[in-house]
Amino acid sequence: MKKAHIIIIDDQIDVLSALLQDLKPFRERFILDDCESADEAHELMEELFASGEKIALIISDHIMPRKNGITLLSELSSDERFEKIRRILITGQASHMDTINAINNASIDHYISKPWKVDELHAIMRRLITHWILDQGYDHKDFEGMVDVDVLFKRIKSEGGPVN
Amino acid sequence: MGSLVDKYFTDRHKVIRLIKDEMLFEKGAVNQRLYFLKEGSVKGIDPDDQGEFFVAESGDYIGLFSFFSLDDQTRMSVRALSDCELLYVDKEDFTHESQDQLLVDFMPVVLQMLSKRQEQARLDYLKHQKVLKDMQEVERLAALGQLSAGVAHELNNAITVISRRSDHIIQEVLQHMRRTDLETELINLGLERGRVVPSAEARRVARELRKISDASDAKLRDYARTGKGEELARQDQATAQRAFGLWNLGASMHDLQLAVKQSEHVIASMRSLAVTQVVRQNDCDVNESIRHAVVLLRNKLKHVELSLDLDELPPIFGNTNELVQVWSNLIKNSVDAMDHQRTDYSKLVVSTSHDDTYVIVRIADSGPGIPDEIRDEIFKPHITTKQQGQTFGLGLGLTIVQKIIKRYAGQLNVRSSHKGAEFEVRIPIKETQ
């Protein structure tokens, strides 16, 4: 099975590379794509969609010139091609009304404050990836080491029956 | 009004002439006269607190309140502002009946005067409120300065440790780490230039490299990020991996150094809010301070077309760090203004020149310009972040700029149109104090 993509967006290259570095463990089962702007991410996503590649998760910075992360993630949630992608916002403004509204309007699955803690970041990613795997109907055994057991258990219990 | 004068102020002998600054009467004196100011002007003041009650011109009546009151006592002193001629009547000239008539006739005048005094009191109150507000602003700035200085002080120790120790780590690594020539080349490249390859280019180059290497796409992208992608792709994987690892190490050191400089810059900015004296040098080069600011803002200027047009300048008596803050804040302001426009055209021109008196620095952007209404507001500090929109940060930049320029006895001019804004800073070459 071809690896799905995880897209990371931040306009500051030093933050972007730090994030990339911290997400290295996920390189085993996913392709990590770094982008420096919302526009670049849009372009990349169109390319990937055109070639039939899957995107599992997007992590985006909040404050960026031209188009900010919240606008980007909101747009994706209303695009039926991309609505299943899990969305994480990284923000230095957790009490910002825009952030709160975006979460409440379900366009963000999780927000992370800067500076992030690596362990927390990994835990959040595992949870969201597990949800995505189950949504896609994939076999979670193919993603050993990246699955959150609690999420798995809860979902199987509520959806009933074995995971196909 | 004329008929009242004709009716009552008919005695030719009842005239008083005053020269300028002469007193008509003092506060608390007994006054049984009603005056009509025929020519000149007078001022009513309270000698105790220097409060000004009124200014009366020709055609006005003086002593209305004391004349019609029960105690005949004047409430203020009246002084002539110019040479005057006043007509008057005495209370004793009137019987009880005619006094009542007098009161009825003068009622409109009294009411008008009361109304005038009331309006004056209202205006004085508003003026007072404004002064209070200005004072509060000054106090707020002072408190802000104290707070900032405190925070800066606390942070400074931590930043110093980070700065010195990261330099130490870099030195030790470079000194003791065994490495091949390729690895040395790469770690130095990372350290010197940092992460200069944009993500989109790394992807593009990686695609090309697939033709000459069967390493994974992720690895090819990593090689591409160094700027020496092709060279690394031609190595065996172990060599290439290790070489990339060392480049990454160098680039992280570069990131550390840059982040330290940023922090030092922020702390310096906060410090200038507290009024402190900085050490100035005789050979301060304004152009150098501009170049320094541009380096510091390299990241922010990434998507901006920057033009530096720096003439040769005479040295001034100044502090480079302070000047760096001025240019940094102005440039940041311009870039932010251009960012909010949704065009691809972001152009910033920084130019320097001089005449006999001043060194002149101009920073012009292609942003939306500054609306007249907020032209003065932009220099006021705002420390709360906006809830809508993306304004954030301490919002102190232009306040600091103004403060510093003032210390140099310089000038700050703003020109704006829909094509963009231009900030012009003039710094005297010779210190005037």
Image: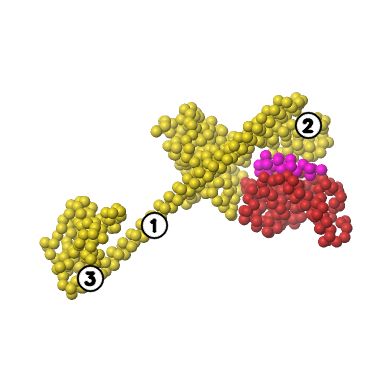
Chain colours: A red, B yellow
Q: Position of residue B383 (x, y in %)?
A: 54, 49
Marks 2 and 3 sit apart, C-alpha to C-alpha, by: 106 Å
At label 3, the amino acid type is: Leu
The residue where tag 3 is placed is B103
Residue B245 drawn above or below residue A141: above
Q: Which quadrant: the N terminus of chain B?
A: bottom left
At label 1, the amino acid type is: Leu
| Mark 2 / mark 3, whichever is N-terminal | 3
Q: Main secondary structure of the magenta part?
A: helix
Number of numbered discs: 3
The residue where tag 1 is placed is B126
Which of the chains bears the disc numbered 1?
B
Residue B215 drawn above or below residue A3: above
Residue appearing at x 58%, y 38% in the figure: B156
Residue B125 drawn above or below residue B208: below
| Mark 1 / mark 2, whichever is N-terminal | 1
Q: Report whether mark 2 lies on the same chain as mark 3.
A: yes
- Contact flag, marks 2 and 3 (Cβ < 8 Å): no
Marks 3 and 1 sit apart, C-alpha to C-alpha, by: 33 Å
Residue appearing at x 69%, y 39% in the figure: B198
Quadrant of the rendered structure where residue B332 is?
Answer: top right
Q: Which mark is residue B242?
A: 2
Marks 1 and 2 sit apart, C-alpha to C-alpha, by: 73 Å
Magenta region includes residue B229: no
The magenta segment is A10-28
Q: Nearer the viewer, mark 2 or mark 3?
A: 3
Magenta region includes residue A27: yes
Q: Position of residue B131 (x, y in %)?
A: 40, 52
Residue appearing at x 19%, y 55% in the figure: B84
Quadrant of the rendered structure where residue B262 is?
Answer: top right
| Mark 3 / mark 1, whichever is N-terminal | 3
